[in-house]
Amino acid sequence: MAGYTWRAVDGEFRVEVDIGGLQKGLVLDTGFTSPACVVGLHVSRSTYQRLRAMGAISEQYSCEVCLADGSTDTTTLGQVEAQLLFDSHPIGPRLKTYIVDGGEDAEELVGTCFFHHIQGGALTWDFTFQTITLNIQD
Amino acid sequence: MEKTEIYQDQKTANLQAYEQLKHEIPHRYSGQYVVIGKGKVLLSAPTYQKAWEQVKLIAPDALHFLIFPADKGPFLETVKVRSHGRIHLACG
């Protein structure tokens, strides 16, 4: 079992994820979810288009997105392979997940559903020290 | 009728259309992306991007539509992005 700890910066946890060969820093957002928990990533349109051009997105769908103000919108999501990184080194399994095209200048997010697919992993949130620690099988 | 009501009506019609056609679509449009809008199959296209561009051209007033690989079916979940956009707090 190995432990990896991230410290909150400006109140946010930012983690590094390799998405189909593209490394991105993403904000952990517990409000970004989907009922069957298959959607783990949310990126700006330019990132989404770059991933598509790289051939990292295997199949695409239109999807309904419910936004913070209660409004709904139709956008695009696609399937990708993604890998959580720590200090640029891969940790845990490589995952298949769906990634949402969040539109122009959208905040780039990793949701709870991404972590729910890390089998055997457990996350500890330390409120006092403002850290999260992922414990995972080596 | 308000925009949200129109959206919901279109969504209901599109989901009903998919239910009625879901066995036929994989045979008829295999290997294609299918667009359901206005309660019917509007078009099929070889790529997702072509399907998206076409639906914006031929049905610019469609608030709800489904684009999906014919062999897989649509993505029917609603994705929640509660923190979409940043909230800036100014103090002092």
Image (cartoon, rainbow, N blue to C red):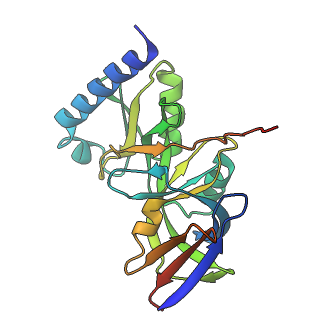
Q: Is residue B33 visible?
A: no
Up-down relation of residue B86 to residue A21 (above or below):
above
B90 displayed left or right of B75 = right
Q: Where is residue A14 in the image (x, y as percent from the top left)?
A: 65, 64
B83 displayed left or right of A58 = right
Return the residue nearer the eye: B65 or A106: A106
Q: Where is residue A103 in the image (x, y as percent from the top left)?
A: 62, 41
Total count of labels: 0
* Extreme residue in the top direction: B1
Taking the spot 57% from the left edge, 63% from the top edge, the residue there is A55
Taking the spot 67% from the left edge, 40% from the top edge, the residue there is B87
Taking the spot 44% from the left edge, 22% from the top edge, the residue there is B62
Q: Position of residue A41 (x, y in %)?
A: 53, 57
Taking the spot 34% from the left edge, 23% from the top edge, the residue there is B8
Q: Where is residue A134 in the image (x, y as percent from the top left)?
A: 51, 78
Return the residue nearer the eye: A104 or B61: A104
Return the residue nearer the eye: A84 or B50: A84
The quadrant in which the C terminus of chain B is found is: top right
Q: Can residue A119 be seen in this view?
A: yes
| Corner quadrant of residue A113 | bottom left
The quadrant in which the N terminus of chain B is found is: top left
Up-down relation of residue B26 to residue A57 (above or below):
above
B9 displayed left or right of A108 = left
Up-down relation of residue A98 to residue B28 (above or below):
below
A44 displayed left or right of A118 = right
